[in-house]
Each structure stands twice: as C-alpha cells, then as structure tokens.
Image (tube, helix red, strand yellow):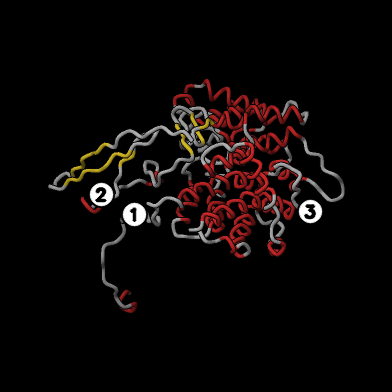
Amino acid sequence: MNEMSKPATQTVTVTLDGTNRSTTLPLLPGTIGPAVLDIRKLYADLGVFTYDPGYGGTAACESKITYIDGDQGILLHRGYPIEQLAEKSTFLEVAYLLLHGDLPTKSEYETFVKGVTYHTMIHEQLRRFYDGFRRDAHPMAVMTAVVGAMSAFYHDSLDINDPRHREISAFRLIAKVPTIAAWAYKYSIGQPFMYPRNDLGYAENFLYMLNAVPAEPYQINPVLARAMDRILILHADHEQNASTSTVRLAGSTGANPFACIAAGIASLWGPAHGGANEAVLKMLAEIGSVKNIPDFISKVKDKNSHVRLMGFGHRVYKNYDPRAKIMQQTCHEVLAELGIKDEPMLDMAMELEKIALNDDYFVSRKLYPNVDFYSGIILKAMGIPTSMFTVLFAVARTVGWISQWKEMMEDPSQRIGRPRQLYTGATARDVTPIDARG
C-alpha cells in the first residue's frame, strides 16, 4: 500500500498564565489533514486537563483506515475515494480493504469471499435465543443481545492477542451479522427463518434471508442486489464516530470482539446516530405533499418553532456529503426498476434538496443533504420497514467496527480508555446523622 510520508514533527510551547510553569508539546502530523497536539504530558507538567465535550476537537487514536475532510466533502477508505469504491467495487472488496489495508488481488478476494461465505450460518442453539423475545421487540434490541451472546458460542477464538483468533472473529462477525439481522426481522413478522445460501453473493444472500419464504422460490433482482451492496459500502466505515469510538473504548478494556460489536450496535441505536434515515421518512410523512413545503421551510427558519430539517447537515461534513450523491443515483435506479413513478416522498425530497441548495439560509449554514436523506426512501421502496433501517446500518458498519478494533489491538501504544472530567459538584463536606438533618 502506498502511503505519503509524514512531515517532520513540530513542537508547541504552552505556558500557564499566572504561573512560572510551561511545557513543550509535540505537534504530530498526519499524512493528510490537520496536525494533532499531543497533550499526554499536559497534566504531568502543568496540572491541567483539556475540556472537550463530545470530543469534537480530540483525537483519541491514530488510524490508517478512514479519512474525512468535511469542508471539502471528501471520504477516503485507505486512500481510495468512496465514489470510486461504490462504483467499481463490491462490499466484500471494501471489507477486505478496511481489514487489510489495500484492495485484494483476484486470488485474495476469492479466498476472502470463501471465508465469509462459509461462516454465514449461526449455531443452532443460538437460534433458540429468538424464542425468548417478544414478537414486537425492536430488531436492534434483538441484534444487541444475540451478537453479544456470540461469545458464549464461539469461545474458541476469543484470545484477542492471537492474530489468527482475531481473523476468525472478523470472519464470523462479517458473515453472521446479516443472518442475525435477517432473522430478527423474520421473527418480528412471524415468518420462518431462512438459512443462508452459499451460492449467493453477500448482498444477494441478505436480501434472500430477508424476503424469501419456504413456500415459493425467491428471484434475486440484480438491480436491488447492487443497490443493497452499494448501501452497505456507503455505510461500511466513517472514522471515529460515536459507535466506532464505543467499540474502541470497549475494546481498550480487553473485552472480546463480540461484546465490543454489541456495544457498537447499542450506540448506533440512538436516533441521533443510526436512526437518522428513519427520522427523514417521518419528516416527509409529516410534510405530506410538495405544496406544504414552503410552510414547512418557514417553520424550519423560525428558531422558535423547534421544527428541524432532517437529513441535511452533518457533524463532520460542511459540504455536500459525497455519499449522498451516490445514494441519490441509487434511489433513482431502484425506483425505476420497481416502476415507482410520482413517488410523493421522492418528489418532496427533490424539492427540499433544490430549496436547500439554493436558499441562502441553508447555503450559509452549509446544510447540504447527507447520506440519510435518500437511504430511507430507497429502503422503503424495497419494502424494508423503518424498524430495520438501523439494523441494516449495523450490518454494514460491522466491518468498519471490526477493522477499527483490529487496528486498535495491533497498536502497541494502546491503553485503556479513561476520559477525564471538569468536576462542578460540591466540595468536601461532613456527613451528619439522619436524625440531625431535620
């Protein structure tokens, strides 16, 4: 893999005002992107911590996997632009790339695909876990529980210090999570579980397990299969977001990979993270029709209305999310294939996009459409219920999580995560007996 050489490390001198104390901190350069001030000895030298709620200005790790330039709308996986990967690669190629550092050769790809394909079935006793859930349980609750329980069934590969064990666990998670997810859906609608088929590709197999029934043959639609594969690629990894940071923090304790991925799934469940595309559909349903958009936009601009424009803007991107452009194209392909015309939600989405890209209110605030804006419409058109949207996100992101976990475990500087705090509670005080407190 070709990597740019890092610039020379610089230093910054920090002086604490009102004292005679100062320290010199290294300014660590990346191959691209902003440099990072190494504050590890700040407390030892100056007796202070940094304060950064939400970790928006803090680098908690060093990584070679994903790079995002939010101002320019750039997303790279191991140096490859997401646009090229979505156009020219399959999801399992991207999975190999994230795990191993470069795109596979033909023989490497065939070996990797075989390794994933022959791990798709789950232990039959694990299947019985589903019977313990209520039928109306949220599929993400089922996912969190079943993935976490995998460590009780696959404990032959839990030595996190053994590279071979890490590889086997990676195969198992990437291969089995679609099966676990599809079965969560089947259980919720009372249909029999469909076992994976080794003759199908990754996205094809997932669609088969979601939609097939034993009573009749299921025909794979290649356009929908490619759309699903592209959706998985676009959600495979996204640098140090909330769920990925959760996986790394859990992993820093030495927890097994199944527990770490379960923690990531739980973090992803939050509506501010993985549930955003569901929120877009809810917003469009509340708008109702294109004719109601002007009134809706007026409410969005009114800071006292508390009405939010969902699917626009991003914590990282201050430009057009590069994934959104690919998702928009995929949306049109799916609707055309399914013969869906004059889809009210798509009409509303296109009108909202046009307004947001031309109205100075949104342009000045850099509220561009993000990947969630179109993905919900695609999944709805494919017949996937909103309760499964975040589950699909988890299926895709599993490969990013396990790649980030693997990279962390191979980092010799890895330490247990231990954030600090700014304490604003009571100072030391004495306890009085309860009878004396009145």
Residue 238 x %, y %:
51, 40
**Residue 233 visible, this angle:** yes
Mark toward the start of the polypeptide (3 vs 1) = 3
Q: Quadrant of residue 134?
A: bottom right
Of residues 182 and 383, which is closer to you in this image?
A: 182
Of residues 159 and 164, which is closer to you in this image?
A: 164
Left or right, 199 with reference to 347: right
Q: Residue at x 48, y 58 (%)?
A: 161
Q: Which mark is residue 191?
A: 3
Q: Residue 420 carries which label?
A: 1
Mark toward the start of the polypeptide (1 vs 2) = 2
Specify the farthest residue to the top.
358
Left or right, 416 with reference to 167: left
Left or right, 107 with reference to 342: left
Q: Residue at x 33, y 79 (%)?
A: 435
Q: Marks 3 and 1, how far apart in space? A: 48 Å
Mark toward the start of the polypeptide (3 vs 2) = 2
Circle 3 SS class: loop
Mark 3 crowdedness (10 Å alpha carbons): few <14, some 14-19, many ≥20: some
**Circle 2: residue type:** Leu
Left or right, 162 with reference to 89: left
Mark 2 crowdedness (10 Å alpha carbons): few <14, some 14-19, many ≥20: some
Q: Is residue 359 above or below residue 381?
A: above
Is label 1 or label 2 in front?
Answer: 2
Q: In this view, does 139 lie above or below 286?
A: below
Q: How many marks?
A: 3
Q: Which mark is residue 349?
A: none
Per the image, the residue denoted by label 2 is 42
Q: Marks 1 and 2, how far apart in space? A: 13 Å
